[in-house]
Image (cartoon, rainbow, N blue to C red):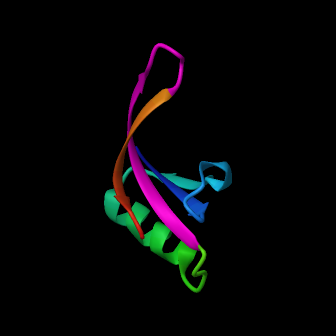
Amino acid sequence: MFQVYTEKDHSNLTKTMIDEFADLDEALECAKKAIEGKPNLRYIVEETTGRFNSYGELIATVVEESD
């Protein structure tokens, strides 16, 4: 599963989940559209495995992010 987030000014406090996708191409397309025309936003696409760490947090790996 791929999760798409936007983030303002590289701050985790502004990280907002946009949507989840099973297909990476769809996730990337959504991510690029989400920040289009918004120079202060960036996107992050993470892949989740469905596994959790010892704190109960979902383990995710960053697949792609914009600058």
Q: Quadrant of the N terminus?
A: top left
Q: Picture coordinates of residue 67 (x, y %)?
A: 42, 70
Residue at x 55% of width, y 60% of height: 10
Q: What segment is highlighted magenta in the picture?
A: 41-57
Q: Picture coordinates of residue 57 (x, y %)?
A: 52, 25
Q: How many marks on residues? A: 0
Is residue 35 part of the magenta span, yes or no?
A: no
Residue farthest to the top, as pictured: 54
Query: On screen, 55 above or below 13?
Result: above
Q: Nearer the viewer, residue 49 or 39?
A: 39
Using residue 62 as the reference point, say whether residue 57 is left or right of it.
Answer: right
Q: Picture coordinates of residue 45 (x, y %)?
A: 42, 55
Magenta-colored segment: predominant secondary structure: strand
Residue farthest to the bottom, as pictured: 37
Q: Nearer the viewer, residue 42 or 28?
A: 42
Query: On screen, 11 above or below 39?
Result: above
Residue at x 61% of width, y 53% of height: 15
Q: Picture coordinates of residue 41 (x, y %)?
A: 58, 71
Query: On screen, 7 above or below 12?
Result: below
Using residue 41 as the reference point, say whether residue 50 is left or right of it.
Answer: left
Residue at x 58% of width, y 86% of height: 37
Asked which quadrant contains residue 24, the reply is: bottom left
Query: On screen, 30 above or below 39?
Result: above
Residue at x 60% of width, y 55% of height: 11
Is residue 56 part of the magenta span, yes or no?
A: yes
Asked which quadrant contains residue 25, the reply is: bottom left
